[in-house]
Amino acid sequence: MQRATLLAERGRTTEAIRLLDEYLAEHPAEPAERGLLIRLNGSVGDFAAAAEQTERLAGVLPANSPIPWVELGAAFELGHRYEEALTAYDRAASVAPRDALGPKRGGMRAARWGELDLAEPRLREAVRRAPHDADAWHALGVVLLGLDRLDAARQAYIAGIAADERALENRLGLATVALRQSEPGTALAQYELLLEARPKFTEALLGKSWCLILLGEYASADAVLRDAERLGADRTSIARQRVELGARERTR
């Protein structure tokens, strides 16, 4: 695995494939190496070989394992064949009806491709199968936010926090929903909780300063912006907020 991975990282994918083929000829029941071989075949566009290796991997894993089809989906993704990738992830969901990996991977990939309508049902199935997966809840929240279904997005983020309070991205999602719904006070509370956990989280500092601007607490906003600047926050965002802050201070 290490040698093949290193070869692939150095752009010597053909050598990596040959190395794995030789190894698996002697050790056919090694799932990790075969999974890597599937993905590498996809990366060079040899999908026939990827499909053949997928069937071999399925032969050494339990019949209800989603892994072979998830690996094939990854191979199709590497070859930019996204519809076939989604089909492979859906097959992973079908062969393993209790495992959330297939629908989660398919939903997250569809979301990244901008196919939000395709992502939502898959992510809903993922959280149904794994209700304690805070990451899947967050992904669902992002999709629902993108579909402008703000109340549903809020519920997804709340469920993600209930699944794992340490999953701070769900609090960031709640703050985003609150701002979209013109509730800066609610958003500010979420940013404060984020900063309790991560005091140097510049994105949360910028969110906090923006909420303070919207709430008319200009001196406090300026102080937070200075902290954000000191910690290396995005300069463009800081500049925009300072322009807005100055404009509001002049008109109050």
Image: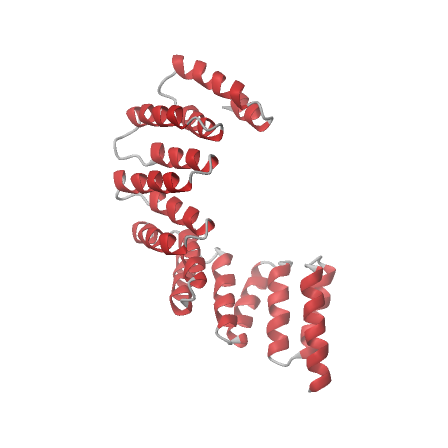
- Residue 230 visible somewhere in the drawing: yes
Residue at left offset 40%, top offset 56%: 140
- Position of residue 81 measured from the top left corner of the image (x, y, whole percent): 42, 38
- Position of residue 151 measured from the top left corner of the image (x, y, whole percent): 39, 69
Q: Is residue 147 left or right of residue 61?
A: right
Q: Is residue 125 left or right of residue 156?
A: left
Residue at left offset 35%, top offset 41%: 89
- Position of residue 86 measured from the top left corner of the image (x, y, whole percent): 37, 42
Depth check: give the residue in front, 1 or 120. Answer: 120
117 w.r.t. 217: above or below = above
Q: Is residue 63 left or right of residue 80?
A: left
Residue 247: name its quadrant: bottom right
Quadrant (top left/top right/bottom left/bottom right) for the C terminus? bottom right
Coloring basis for residues: secondary structure
Q: Is residue 69 left or right of residue 226?
A: left
155 w.r.t. 74: above or below = below
Residue at left offset 42%, top offset 54%: 134
9 w.r.t. 252: above or below = above
